[in-house]
């Protein structure tokens, strides 16, 4: 990676999480934002960041687009209208709701790779150990860049939306049921908040990594037994 210049566009939750993890890997990452003061505020949180001007984007080897799906095409169109040549840059589309094929269709002269993060940006920020999805094998430098943060799986980009919808649906359903049951039992709002923000998330995390305590294991057994009847 030392011979490759990496740039990041997008300083929201995902951009911040990526930057923190790359900072811990001591990877230098250039950051571009149209408002220079916002770039400065952002990179002051990390040791590995430096500011990119718009003209610098054409000199980057890998440009990470951690933007929303609706913002990527206007951003690329703006660069094209200003005569910025990105044909030698490897672009990485991370937008959940924008399939990379759409970018390639709109900008056929550009080299675009889809790398989609499956999970929540806060979890990536705090814990790392990410899971990324790409439809095709990635060029070595891009693969190395993301493998430093976790695992890369080859699968359809649309699988991310499918998994996110399922996980969000059942998580929201559980949250709504917790609120309803606690209200039915007359438990205070503070107990509801603690259940939703601490107890339930940590039980799910422990269940997923096999580290449930005895109390939780007994409850899991009760649930499994009731399902088998």
Image (spheres, rainbow, N blue to C red):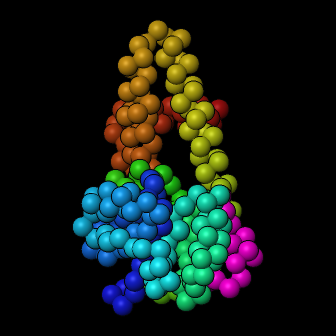
- The residue closer to the viewer here, 40 or 25, is 40
Residue 22 vertical position relative to residue 198 in the rendered view, above or below: below
Residue 72 x, y percent position in the rendering: 61, 65
Q: Residue at x 43, y 22 (%)?
A: 192
Residue at x 40%, y 69% (from the top left corner): 31
List the single residue furthest toward the right.
105
Residue 99 on image: x %, y %? 68, 66
Q: Position of residue 34 (x, y in %)?
A: 47, 63
- Quadrant in which the N terminus is drawn: bottom left
Tally of numbered discs? 0
Asked whether 77 or 88 is in front, the reply is 77
Farthest-out residue, front: 82
Q: Position of residue 103 (x, y in %)?
A: 69, 72
Is 110 within the magenta? yes
Residue at the spot 55% in from the left edge and 78% down from the top edge: 91
Q: Locate residue 91 relative to residue 214 in the image: left or right.
A: right
Outermost residue toward the left in this view:
47
- Is 38 located above or below residue 195 in the figure? below
| 176 to 202, vertically: above or below | above
- Look at the image and tell me in which quarter the C terminus lies: top right
Q: Nearer the viewer, residue 169 or 72?
A: 72
The residue at the point 53 percent across, 18 percent down is 181
Q: Which residues are magenta?
A: 97-112
Q: In the image, is residue 125 part of the stretch drawn in magenta?
A: no
Kindly tell me whether residue 156 is visible in this rendering. no
Res 74 quadrant in image: bottom right
Residue 163 visible within the image: yes
């Amino acid at each position: 990676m030392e011979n490759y210049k990496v740039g990041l566009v997008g300083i929201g939750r995902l951009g911040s999480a990526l930057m923190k993890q790359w900072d811990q890997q001591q990877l230098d990452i250039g950051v571009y934002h149209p408002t220079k003061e916002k770039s400065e505020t952002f990179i002051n949180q990390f040791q590995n960041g430096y500011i990119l001007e718009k003209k610098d984007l054409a000199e980057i080897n890998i440009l990470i687009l951690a933007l929303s799906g609706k913002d990527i095409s206007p951003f690329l169109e703006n660069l094209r209208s200003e005569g910025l040549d990105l044909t030698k840059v490897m672009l990485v589309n991370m937008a959940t709701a924008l399939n990379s094929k759409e970018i390639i269709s709109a900008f056929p002269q550009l080299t675009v790779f889809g790398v989609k993060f499956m999970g929540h940006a806060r979890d990536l920020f705090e814990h790392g150990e990410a899971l990324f999805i790409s439809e095709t094998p990635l060029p070595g430098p891009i693969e190395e860049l993301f493998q430093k943060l976790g695992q890369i799986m080859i699968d359809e980009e649309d699988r991310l939306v499918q998994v996110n919808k399922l996980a969000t649906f059942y998580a929201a359903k559980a949250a709504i049921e917790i609120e309803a049951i606690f209200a039915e039992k007359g438990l205070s709002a503070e107990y509801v908040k603690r259940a939703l923000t601490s107890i339930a998330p940590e039980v799910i995390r422990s269940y997923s990594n096999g580290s449930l305590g005895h109390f939780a294991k007994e409850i899991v057994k009760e649930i499994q037994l009731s399902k088998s009847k």
